[in-house]
Image (tube, coloured by chain):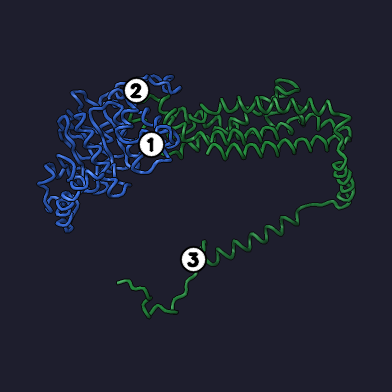
């Protein structure tokens, strides 16, 4: 039947090309043409005021030059207080956010939660994800006033949307057999979660929590711009006073802390596999 | 001890996986359930401990109708039925000891199990079972560090620490090499004999089943088409269960190998 050498009638007579993704030639070339025309039109519609750009370049240059001589000294106590506030906000909101995310994540996993619980938890996740941190922060500042409390609540809320969703998705894709085996022993629901589900999703939960810690710190720097406390508030003040050298010092500090977090989270995530 | 009365399962997709299955298993009997893929073997054993809900009919274990139980009574009933899985189904990130002790979950409270503070008698029993299946040294290894045969031994220990009266065994040898398969089957059958346990063993390998069990049930399209002793099974019976094929080699091979096997038992 099948021999090592192809039958003679196939040698050199049949060409093969990967079949195109879109079969109709007209549709394929038509779509390509539309895309090109759209891109040209889109770039054409960008309105650039070159005079303004020229002026702005000089300002931008001043800003960049400031980085070569960042001033940590003259506003050091402001920078230090802002950083401490940001770090406290970050850690507190991550811890609270993770703790709240776990039950919501369990509820938002279709394979372990009954439908009504699933719908409620998914709704919470959807609301949290639909609203950007800045929008929530503005609302929280309106309710709780200026300061880190508003930032803390904002970041906790944002963490819930992020972590619950990803945790729920990890639970939904877990190995069913392991969970089934625990169910077959006659364990109760919490025991089933603790033995059958938790070990499977723990590495991802830890990895995501650390990643979120990282995100929360970066966000805390932005939230200060709308009055929700942290290093962002100090940065905002520095910009308002045109103290670019102080601003540069703050940004450099933020970069260093984010890099340190990135590095440690990489190590921890590799360890928990 | 276990009686199935017209057990039927129709999946929501409309597939009739089990059609009016009735059979009775006395205490201490080891029974093999054979049949082609999709014949309903897995569904049958899962309908007994209700990992799958049967559509109608009943499963009666020691006079208790399992199909009628509420959730907490069902959990108590599941303790009586140890289950051994295809692909082992160990919780891979837990240690061997935690996997074995998880067989006690039906007996211990949440906090005890959460804090891994099991009663000393459970721990003694776990070590005894690990010793029996030859894995005492592995107690604190993570389950995913073990080989296939070792994992299945842990699975067996997990099922036995439940102190069950019935073992439900789903394709225990499906992912094991031929020699390990025999060792696992032998271990299961020996343990059943030691503890006078009844067992239902789903198995693809007809020759392997014939080698170890006392009774064979052939399932085809959700119905029982053979019920009898493994020795009396003829090529015609296998044709009835699986369809047309030359079966003489399968059956004869068993007899030949059986002799050879008995000679090598001591060596293993």
Closer to the camera, B154 or B88?
B154
Closer to the eye: label 2 or 3: 2
Q: Where is residue A242 in the image (x, y as percent from the top left)?
A: 89, 35
- Chain letter for mark 3: A
Closer to the camera, A109 or B173?
B173
Closer to the camera, B166 or A42?
B166
* Marks 1,3: beta carbons within 8 A: no
Q: What element carries label 2?
A: helix
| Mark toward the start of the polypeptide (1 vs 2) | 1
Q: Position of residue B61 (x, y in %)?
A: 20, 26
Pick the quarter of the image with the N terminus of chain B.
top left
Report the residue marked by disc 1.
Answer: B90
Identify the colour of chain B in the image.
blue
Question: Which residue is rendered at x = 13% and y = 50% of the image?
Answer: B237
Q: In which quarter of the image is residue B69?
A: top left
Pick the quarter of the image with the C terminus of chain B.
top left
Closer to the camera, B79 or A48?
B79
Q: Position of residue A245 (x, y in %)?
A: 87, 37
Mark 1 on the same chain as mark 3: no
Task: Give me the disc on residue B122.
Answer: 2
Task: Give me the disc on residue B151.
Answer: none
Mark 1 on the same chain as mark 2: yes
- Chain letter for mark 1: B
Q: What element carries label 1?
A: loop
How far is disc 2 from disc 3 in space, using C-alphas?
Answer: 62 Å
Report the residue marked by disc 3.
Answer: A19
Q: What element carries label 3?
A: loop
Identify the colour of chain A in the image.
green
How far is disc 1 from disc 3 in space, using C-alphas?
Answer: 44 Å
């Amino acid at each position: 039947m099948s021999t090592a050498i192809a039958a003679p009638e196939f040698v050199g007579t049949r060409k093969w090309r990967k079949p195109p993704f879109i079969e109709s030639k007209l549709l394929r070339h038509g779509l390509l043409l539309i895309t090109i025309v759209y891109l040209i039109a889109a770039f054409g519609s960008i309105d650039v005021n070159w005079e303004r750009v020229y002026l702005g370049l000089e300002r931008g240059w001043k800003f960049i030059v400031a980085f070569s001589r960042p001033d940590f000294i003259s506003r050091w106590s402001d920078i230090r207080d802002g950083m401490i506030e940001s770090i406290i906000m970050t850690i507190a909101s991550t811890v609270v956010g993770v703790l709240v995310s776990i039950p919501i994540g369990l509820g938002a996993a279709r394979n372990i939660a009954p439908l009504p619980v699933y719908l409620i938890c998914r709704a919470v996740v959807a609301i949290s994800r639909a609203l950007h941190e800045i929008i929530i922060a503005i609302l929280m500042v309106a309710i709780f006033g200026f300061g880190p409390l508003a930032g803390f609540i904002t970041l906790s809320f944002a963490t819930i949307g992020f972590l619950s969703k990803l945790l729920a998705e990890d639970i939904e894709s877990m190995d069913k057999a392991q969970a089934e085996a625990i169910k077959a022993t006659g364990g109760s629901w919490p025991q089933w979660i603790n033995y059958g589900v938790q070990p499977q999703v723990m590495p991802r939960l830890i990895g995501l929590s650390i990643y979120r810690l990282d995100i929360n710190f970066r966000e805390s720097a932005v939230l200060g711009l709308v009055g929700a406390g942290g290093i962002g508030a100090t940065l905002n003040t520095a910009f308002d006073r045109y103290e670019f050298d102080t601003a540069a010092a703050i940004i450099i500090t933020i970069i260093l802390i984010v890099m340190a977090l990135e590095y440690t989270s990489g190590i921890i995530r590799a360890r928990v596999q | 001890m276990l009686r199935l009365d017209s057990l039927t399962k129709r999946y929501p997709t409309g597939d009739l996986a089990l059609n009016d299955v009735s059979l009775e298993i006395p205490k201490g009997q080891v029974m093999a359930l054979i049949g082609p893929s999709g014949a309903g073997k897995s569904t049958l054993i899962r309908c007994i401990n209700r990992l799958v809900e049967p559509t109608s009919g009943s499963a009666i274990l020691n006079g208790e109708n399992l199909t009628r139980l509420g959730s907490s009574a069902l959990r108590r009933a599941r303790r009586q039925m140890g289950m051994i899985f295809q692909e082992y189904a160990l919780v891979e990130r837990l240690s061997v000891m935690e996997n074995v002790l998880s067989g006690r979950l039906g007996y211990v409270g949440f906090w005890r199990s959460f804090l891994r503070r099991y009663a000393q008698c459970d721990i003694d029993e776990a070590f005894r079972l690990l010793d029996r299946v030859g894995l005492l040294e592995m107690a604190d290894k993570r389950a995913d560090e073990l080989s296939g045969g070792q994992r299945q031994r842990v699975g067996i220990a997990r099922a036995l620490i439940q102190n069950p009266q019935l073992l439900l065994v789903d394709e225990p040898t499906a992912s094991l090499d031929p020699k390990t398969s025999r060792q696992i089957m032998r271990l299961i059958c020996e343990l059943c004999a030691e503890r006078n346990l009844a067992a239902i063993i789903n198995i693809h390998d007809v020759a392997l089943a014939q080698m170890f069990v006392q009774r064979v049930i052939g399932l085809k399209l959700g119905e029982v088409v053979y019920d009898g002793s493994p020795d009396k099974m003829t090529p015609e019976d296998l044709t009835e269960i699986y369809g047309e094929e030359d079966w003489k080699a399968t059956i004869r091979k068993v007899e030949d190998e059986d002799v050879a096997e008995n000679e090598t038992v001591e060596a293993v």
